[in-house]
Image (spheres, rainbow, N blue to C red):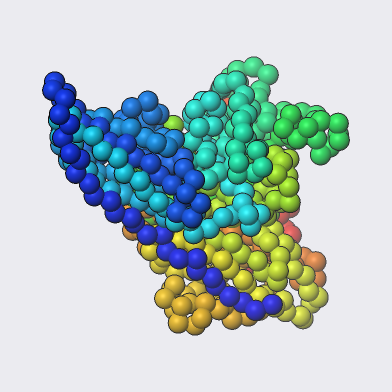
C-alpha cells in the first residue's frame, strides 16, 4: 500500500464587514443585527458557537442564546441587540469546518443582517470516525445543545444530573449525553468512572484503589454482554485516569482495571488563558518541561512511561467545558466505529481504535490497520510499516512525527511533506514496542496536538517492558506510600500499596528493554 499524506486544505478565516443603516423609529437606543451561518455547499443552516466582542474586547450575549466561557450558542439565525458602537465576532463549527469572523457597527435603532457560508474540509463521521468529549462539566440538558455546534456525537457529563438523550443527525439520529459518570476528586485521586456511581458518598478514608474494585465488581449489564437490552440502556463500567499526575497513579496501573487515560485533559487551555502547573510526585526528565507548553508535554511524557512499562492503555480526551475556560470538544477523542451505537463507540475507545486531538484531525492507518493493531514477527525478522495519513489542520503545524518507544522514528515539517509529495517512506522496526503518529502545532502559548492511540509491535510474541519505566513507577509508589502514611487512608490503603509493590517488582523482573 503506498504511503501518502493527504491535506484537505487549511481552514481559512472568512471576513465579513458591514455597517447597518439607521432606522427611522425614534426612541431606540440599541441597534440590531441578525447573523445566519450556512454550510457553503448545502446552504443548510449550521449550529455554531459565536463569540461577540465589543470595542473593549468584552464578550456579549446574544438575545436568547446560551453563553458559556464567552461563547454564544448560535442556532441560526442569531439576533444580537447592542448599544451603539463597533463589534467583532468569531464563528466556529468545530475542526471540520473553516472558522469565520467579521465585524459590524451598530448605530441607534440600526437594523441589519449578514449571512456567513462556511466551507467544510472534512466529514469524519462519513469516514467512520466518531468524536466525543469525556470531560464536560455542564448539566446534560445544557451539554446536549452544544454537541452539534462542535460536530461531536457524544459527551460525558461529570455532574450529578438526570440523564438526557436526544437526537442528532450526525449518526443517523443518535446523540449521547451521559451523566452516569463519577469523578473522584478527593486528595490523591483523579479517576473517572463512566457508567458507574458509588452507592453512597465516598469518605476521605476510602482509598481510590478501593473504588476500582467496587466499580469492576458491578455486573456487566451491557447490550453486548446480555443481548437483551438496547445499547443506549446500559454499558460496562469504563474507568479512566483523568489526572495522570495524581498521587495514587502507580496503584491504579498495578490494578489491571484502568480502561483509558486522558492524554488531553483539563490541564490544557486555549492560548489566551494562563497555563496551569502540574506537579507529579516524580517528574519525568526533571528540568526539561518549562513554559506554557509544560503541562501538556509533561503529561505526554508520563503517558509514554506507562506505555514503556508494557501497559497497553489507550488515550482519551476531555475539555472541562462548563468550568474550565474552554469550549466543548476543545480536547476530543475520535473512535473508529463499525456501527452507530454507544456500545460500539466505547468498545472502540477501550480497544484503542482512536486518536485524540486539541485541533488537528489526524486519521492514520498502518499496514491498512487502525490504531490499536498489533504487528508480529519472529526473532531476527523486522516489521515493515506503511503509514497512510489523512490530515486536516487549521492551526500552523510545527511538525508531524512517528514515535517508536519514545524515540523519533521519522519526523518532518509540513512543508517538507508537500515537497515530497506528501509521502512517508516505508519504515521498519526489529524490536518490540509501541508506536504513535503525532502532529504538533506551532502554537507557542499552549500544547495543541493530535496523536493516535498506540500501535504495537511484538517480536517473538513478547511486548516491550522497560526497566527504567518500571523503576520510575516504583519510585513514585514509594513517594505516594510516604504521603499516604500520614493521611486518613494510612490503614485502608496499605493492602493496595503492598499489592502494587509486588506488581512492579514482577514487572521489573520481566523487563526486556533498558
Query: Picture coordinates of residue 403 (x, y %)?
Result: 56, 67
Which residue corresponds to the image point at 55% horizontal and 43% vertical from the top-left? 152
The image quadrant where one finds the N terminus is bottom right
Which residue lies at the image location 50% right of the left edge and 32% below the top edge? 145
- Residue 434 placement, left or right of 318: right
Split into 4 quadrants, where in the image is the C terminus? bottom right
Of residues 459 and 342, the one drawn nearer to the viewer in this rendering: 342
Q: Where in the figure is residue 471, as x and y percent of width and height?
A: 60, 55
Q: Residue furthest right?
A: 227
* Number of numbered labels in the structure image: 0
Figure check: 496 above or below 27: below
Residue 513: quadrant of the picture: bottom right
Q: Residue 8: image x %, image y %?
A: 50, 65
User: Where's residue 501, x and y in %?
Assistant: 67, 44
The answer to whether 303 is drawn above or below residue 179 in the figure is: below
Q: Residue at x 72, y 62 (%)?
A: 373
From this viewpoint, which residue is outermost toward the front? 24
Between 117 and 246, the residue placed more toward the observer is 117
Amino acid at each position: 500500500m503506498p504511503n501518502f499524506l493527504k491535506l484537505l486544505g487549511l481552514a481559512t478565516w472568512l471576513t465579513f464587514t458591514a455597517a447597518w443603516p439607521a432606522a427611522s423609529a425614534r426612541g431606540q437606543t440599541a441597534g440590531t443585527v441578525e447573523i445566519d451561518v450556512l454550510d457553503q455547499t448545502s446552504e443548510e443552516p449550521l449550529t455554531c458557537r459565536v463569540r461577540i466582542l465589543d470595542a473593549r474586547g468584552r464578550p456579549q450575549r446574544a438575545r436568547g442564546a446560551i453563553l458559556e466561557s464567552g461563547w454564544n450558542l448560535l442556532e441560526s439565525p442569531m439576533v444580537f441587540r447592542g448599544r451603539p458602537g463597533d463589534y467583532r465576532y468569531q464563528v466556529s463549527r468545530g475542526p471540520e469546518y473553516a472558522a469565520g469572523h467579521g465585524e459590524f457597527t451598530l448605530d441607534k435603532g440600526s437594523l441589519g443582517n449578514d449571512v456567513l457560508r462556511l466551507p467544510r474540509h472534512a466529514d469524519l463521521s462519513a469516514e467512520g470516525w466518531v468524536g466525543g468529549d469525556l470531560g464536560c462539566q455542564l448539566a446534560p440538558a445544557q451539554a446536549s445543545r452544544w454537541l452539534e455546534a462542535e460536530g461531536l456525537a457524544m459527551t460525558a457529563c461529570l455532574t450529578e444530573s438526570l440523564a438526557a438523550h436526544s437526537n442528532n443527525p450526525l449518526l443517523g439520529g443518535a446523540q449521547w449525553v451521559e451523566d452516569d459518570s463519577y469523578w473522584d476528586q478527593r486528595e490523591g485521586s483523579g479517576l473517572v468512572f463512566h457508567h458507574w456511581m458509588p452507592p453512597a458518598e465516598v469518605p476521605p478514608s476510602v482509598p481510590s484503589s478501593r473504588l476500582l474494585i467496587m466499580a469492576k465488581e458491578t455486573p456487566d449489564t451491557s447490550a453486548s454482554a446480555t443481548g437483551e437490552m438496547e445499547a443506549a440502556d446500559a454499558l460496562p463500567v469504563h474507568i479512566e485516569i483523568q489526572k495522570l499526575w495524581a498521587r495514587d497513579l502507580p496503584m491504579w496501573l498495578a490494578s489491571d482495571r484502568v480502561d483509558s487515560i486522558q492524554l488531553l485533559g483539563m490541564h490544557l487551555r486555549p492560548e489566551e488563558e494562563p497555563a496551569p502547573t502540574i506537579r507529579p510526585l516524580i517528574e519525568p526528565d526533571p528540568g526539561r518541561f518549562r513554559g506554557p507548553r509544560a503541562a501538556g508535554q509533561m503529561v505526554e511524557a508520563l503517558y509514554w512511561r506507562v506505555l514503556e512499562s508494557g501497559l497497553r492503555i489507550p488515550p482519551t480526551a476531555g475539555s472541562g467545558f462548563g468550568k474550565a475556560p474552554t469550549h466543548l470538544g476543545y480536547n476530543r477523542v475520535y473512535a473508529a466505529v463499525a456501527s452507530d451505537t454507544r456500545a460500539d463507540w466505547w468498545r472502540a475507545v477501550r480497544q484503542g481504535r482512536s486518536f485524540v486531538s486539541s485541533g488537528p484531525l489526524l486519521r492514520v492507518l498502518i499496514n491498512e490497520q487502525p490504531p490499536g493493531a498489533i504487528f508480529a514477527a519472529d526473532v531476527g525478522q523486522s516489521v515493515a510499516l506503511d503509514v497512510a495519513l489523512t490530515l486536516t489542520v487549521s492551526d500552523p503545524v510545527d511538525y508531524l512525527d512517528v514515535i517508536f518507544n519514545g524515540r523519533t522514528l521519522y519526523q518532518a515539517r509540513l512543508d517538507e511533506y508537500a515537497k515530497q509529495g506528501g509521502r512517508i517512506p516505508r519504515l521498519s522496526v526489529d524490536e518490540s514496542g509501541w508506536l504513535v503518529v503525532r502532529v504538533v502545532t506551532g502554537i507557542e502559548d499552549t500544547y495543541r496536538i493530535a496523536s493516535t492511540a498506540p500501535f504495537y509491535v511484538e517480536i517473538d510474541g513478547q511486548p516491550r517492558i522497560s526497566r527504567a519505566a518500571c523503576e520510575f513507577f516504583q519510585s513514585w509508589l514509594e513517594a505516594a506510600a510516604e504521603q499516604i502514611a500520614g493521611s486518613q487512608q494510612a490503614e485502608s490503603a496499605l493492602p493496595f500499596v503492598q499489592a502494587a509493590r509486588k506488581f512492579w517488582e514482577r514487572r521489573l523482573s520481566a523487563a526486556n528493554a533498558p
